[in-house]
Amino acid sequence: MEFHHVSILLGPCIEALQIKPNGVYVDATTGGAGHSLRIAEKLDETGRLICIDRDDEALQNAKTRLADVWDRVTPVKSDFREIDRVLADLGLAGADGILFDLGVSSPQLDHAERGFSYMQDAPLDMRMDRSQRLTAYEVVNGWSREEIRRILFEYGEERYAPLIAAAIEREREEKPIETTLELSDLIRRAMPAKARREKQHPAKRSFQAIRIAVNDELSAVNEAMEKAIDCLAPGGRLAVITFHSLEDRIVKTAFLRAAQGCTCPKGFPVCVCGNKPKVRLTPRKPILPDEAEIEENPRARSAKLRVCEKL
């Protein structure tokens, strides 16, 4: 697969990381390697970039795209929730900057055979790590109607989740649902006529929900944020790009919790919990793409960048 990927919020990310030429940096979601390339270009021969991804094709692409700076790069196949173990295995005490670009990458969406897209026909897959066992096929054909309803509602914020889950159950009683377009068409038919006329594709929210379930994305983000903050060296920056409200809520909560410190009730005369702030927010509100970037790359529209600095 050829990875063609436009990096979102590239300039703001690089500015936020405040890259030092001799620093240690982690791109925890290497993807198309656009952010990785810009980071590595700012390092000298003593600097180091750790490129993490669980998609073999992404790492293979990174080797090609980063060929001119490969002497500064260490690729690692891993889930980003293992960032602490990755750094420990490399003998690194901490990082001067860590970047997460969450969600599915453009190449995974654009290449039909990966099964992420509701616009192109392919076997139901949606695995970011193609060596894992759970696929979208197993979720759609093997999970209970109630569990499918739950993930559609919670992960996709799909208001017609009960109708869609019921339609899936009826269809698979006749025969398995095997391809993306079969599922997409089933979802469309299950929804009321007024919903099918909305600007957004009827299957978008459901496909997002199933993808999140297959890859255990929200649990991974929740676990990774706390670990990433602990992995930062003093003065190090953590930059996280999110693309939907569920991810952003997790990141925002983790940042605020780490910046808060004391958790004692407000009425306590003195602190008894002993918690100290770990980070400061830089800035407090998320950074959004400007109109020029959105016009050039519509996928940037929902992106938010949050940044914190280790104290």
Image (cartoon, rainbow, N blue to C red):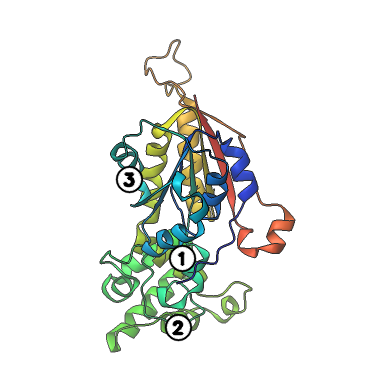
The residues bearing labels 2 and 1 have C-alpha atoms spaced at a distance of: 16 Å
| Residue displayed at 65% across by 63% down | 297
Residue under label 2:
121
Classify mark 1: helix, strand or loop.
Answer: helix
Q: Is residue 98 above or below residue 289?
A: above
**Labels 2, 1: front one:** 2
Marking on residue 82: 3
Label 2 Cα neighbours within 10 Å, binned few <14 / some 14-19 / many ≥20: some
Residue found farthest to the right: 292
Residue projecting furthest to the bottom: 174
The total number of labels drawn is 3
Q: Which residue is mark 1?
A: 208
Locate the N terminus by quadrant.
bottom left
43 shown above or below 102: above
Amino acid type assigned to the residue bearing label 3 in the image: Glu
Circle nearer the viewer, 1 or 3 = 3
The residue closer to the viewer here, 181 or 100, is 100
Q: Amino acid at mark 2?
A: Asp
Of residues 261 and 117, the one drawn nearer to the viewer in this rendering:
117
Q: Residue 305, relative to residue 174: is it above or below?
A: above
Q: Residue at x 51, y 59 (%)?
A: 65
* First reached walking from the N terminus: tag 2 or tag 3: 3
Residue 72 showing in the rendered view: yes
Residue neighbourhood size for the residue with mark 1, other residues' Cα within 10 Å, grouped as few (<14), some (14–19), many (≥20): many
